[in-house]
Amino acid sequence: MNKLFAGAIALILMCGAAMAQDIAGDWRTAADDNGNTGLIRVAPCGDAYCGVLIQAYDASGNVMESENVGRQIIWDTRLHSGTEYRGRLYSPDRDSTYNSRLQLSGNTLVVSGCRLGICREGGRWSRVN
């Protein structure tokens, strides 16, 4: 009976892990204070997720040059609970690093971060792929 119970618990845990939404992929950021957006590629890195800015866009949606292309924007990001991820986030328009909270809902990632007790919303990122 104990083996059956342990097997049932293991099956439930595996199903829950399989159902967890994954943040890996390409994400279009919300516009920053200047109206610019970016394309962030999020992928596993070790036991966490990291995201690199792979393209920058101006307020008109045109590709623009940016010294931040190639820069790591999110790192040390891990599933915290359900569809919430927590880690670190760099905001190029503010040149600041935040403790991040990423709330995943389908193809939308609601981004927020806190630094020195001050929190700010990073908007809604949209999955591109």
Image (tube, rainbow, N blue to C red):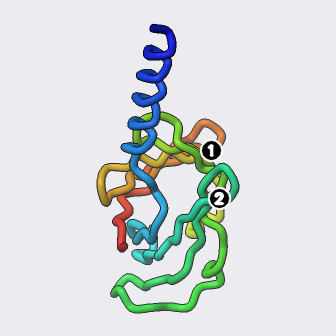
Q: Where is residue 59 in the image (x, y as percent from the top left)?
A: 38, 82
Residue matched to label 2: 96
Mark 2 element type: strand
| Residue furthest left in the image | 106
The answer to the question of whether label 2 and label 1 lie on touching residues, with beta carbons closer than 8 A, is: yes
* Location of residue 82 by image quarter: top left
Left or right position of 101 against 110: right
Q: How far apart are marks 2 and 1 (CA)?
A: 8 Å
Q: Residue at x 66, y 74 (%)?
A: 71
Left or right of 2? Residue 110 is: left
Q: What residue type is labelled 1?
A: Arg
Q: Residue furthest toward the top?
A: 1
Work out whether 102 lies above or below 56.
Answer: above
Q: Which residue is drawn at 50% across and 9% down?
A: 2
Say whether residue 59 is left or right of residue 41.
left
As displayed, is residue 92 above or below residue 80?
A: below
Image-based side of 6 in relation to 31, left or right: right
Closer to the camera, 113 or 46?
46
Q: Which residue does the numbered mark 1 point to in the structure image? A: 115
Label located before the other in sequence (2 or 1): 2
Q: Residue 59 carries which label?
A: none
Q: Which quarter shows the C terminus?
A: bottom left
Residue positioned 65% across, 83% down in the render: 67
Q: Where is residue 51 in the image (x, y as percent from the top left)?
A: 58, 65
